[in-house]
Amino acid sequence: MLLAIFKQFQSKNFAKLLVIQYLLNVMSKILGIIGGGQLGMMLTEAAQNLDDISKIIVLDPTENCPAAKVGAQQIVADFKDEDAIKKLSELSDIITYEIESGNSDVLKKLEENTEINPSPDTLRIIQDKLLQKQFLQKNGIAVAEFEKIENKEELNQMIDKMGLPLLLKTRRDAYDGRGNYKINSKSEIDDALDLFSGKTLMVEKFVKFEKEVSVIAARNTKGEISTYPVVENIHENNILRTTIAPGRVSETVRKEAEKIAEKTMEVLHGAGVFGIEMFVTSDDEILINEIAPRVHNSGHHTLQSCSTSQFEQHLRAILGMELGDSSIKTPTIMYNILGPKTFQGEYNVLFKKQDNIHLKMYGKLESKPQRKIGHVNIVDVENRGMDELFKQVEDLKKNLVIEPKES
Ligand code: ATP
Ligand code: MG
């Protein structure tokens, strides 16, 4: 008798489980990501842990890209390939991106049928540094003085007006400072214009900043906003090398930077995670350098320092879920691993394991000079303070070796 009741109970529960499973499958979404590099890879890994996403498809020109290596399906095509973007939208319920150079016009057309976050309108503003700065200025958010440049004469006039040094910047598709030329004297004008010939340009007053900081901010589709604590960024040769989380800034700077990030998210209207890069001057003035409409290198520390990583937060934001806890639980230094200048090709990583050091390689087949191939998060689990973490960074600089693979 008892057994019969138990069996009935079990089968009822089993049926319930089947229904729940079915509903989850119906409700869960196929996520399309434009770009399958390291950011797409870490988004894929976060998506694999969310019940709300059943499958991940990335669009990337490099066959077997990092995201595909960790289990995303891949469409092999250029990021701006209209047919490929259309195909991605047909296969996906929701589209996002890990690069800002996507084709916002094509995405705009597809928006009627497929949810796209951040929205193509937000992407269009951000992906053009001039439109982005005009937008921030219009909304009362401080940026360095800037101007559009169309020819040599205008550049000359701007040098007279703003003084030297001056930064000449390409308006679109720049990364790791490759679209920037610091003009120190008028004799460099021709070289600078030659380097960027055929590109749309702007100039920016050179900011003598004391520190570079950033805030990773999230806004979900319901308009709720959450910011991670401000972090400090150290660049080498224009490439982000080290992020210190939380940043070593005064309470006033911390509050102000986070306030600016919140205001930016309010006016931008986009859903997703955004990386907001800022300069802090010696008199604690804060200017936005630029916004990335995506997860950001200076947010990689969140994989270990926070209970919600920026990758999970991005997915929560675009899926309209409640945003996760963004407080830093353990101070962390993130250190980028760049390909050595000495070779290009397949490689081995030599690295001495330590409990509080988390190595994340991006699965790139080849190491290329000065390109990001991985990062480490050094986490202060024993509460020994930042100085100890910095010592470990110095050790790593000597002991983490990328060497060519013997064939
Ligand atoms: P990334 O991929 O690192 O975000 P990017 O190619 O988009 O870079 P920017 O962020 O505009 O380029 O600039 C790269 C770096 O150059 C900045 O982090 C900063 O160190 C320096 N820089 C940019 N603009 C200015 C400026 N107006 N004054 C002083 N330094 C600047
Ligand atoms: Mg930048």
Image: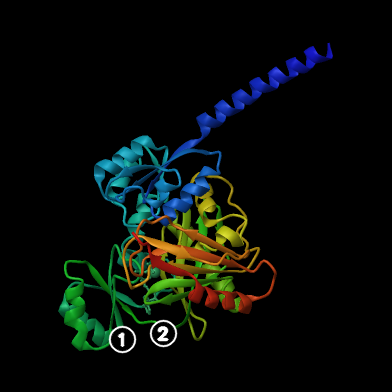
Instruction: Say which residue appears at 55% left-offset and 26% top-offset.
Output: 22
Q: Is residue 98 above or below residue 233?
A: above
Say which label, 1 or 2, has the lower sequence index.
Answer: 1
The residue under label 2 is which amino acid type? Lys
> Where, quadrant-wise, is the N terminus in this rendering?
top right
Q: Can residue 43 be seen in this view?
A: yes
Identify the element where label 2 is drawn: loop
Query: Secondary structure beneath disc 1?
Result: loop
Specify whether tag 2 is near ligand 1 (CB below 8 Å). Answer: yes
| Circle 1: residue type | Pro
Residue 6, position as x, y percentages in the image: 78, 18
| Position in image of residue 53 (x %, y %) | 50, 39
Quarter of image, res 258: bottom right
> With respect to residue 204, does 343 lie above or below?
above
Q: State the residue at coordinates (21%, 87%).
A: 186
> Dividing the image into 4 quarters, which one contains the C terminus?
bottom left
Say few, some or many: other residues with alpha carbon within 10 Å of mark 1 (under 14 / 14 to 19 / 20 or more): some
Give me the C-alpha separation between circle 1 and circle 2.
10 Å
Q: Which residue lies furthest to the front in this view?
A: 407
Q: Name the residue under label 1.
A: 165
What residue is shown with label 2?
Answer: 208
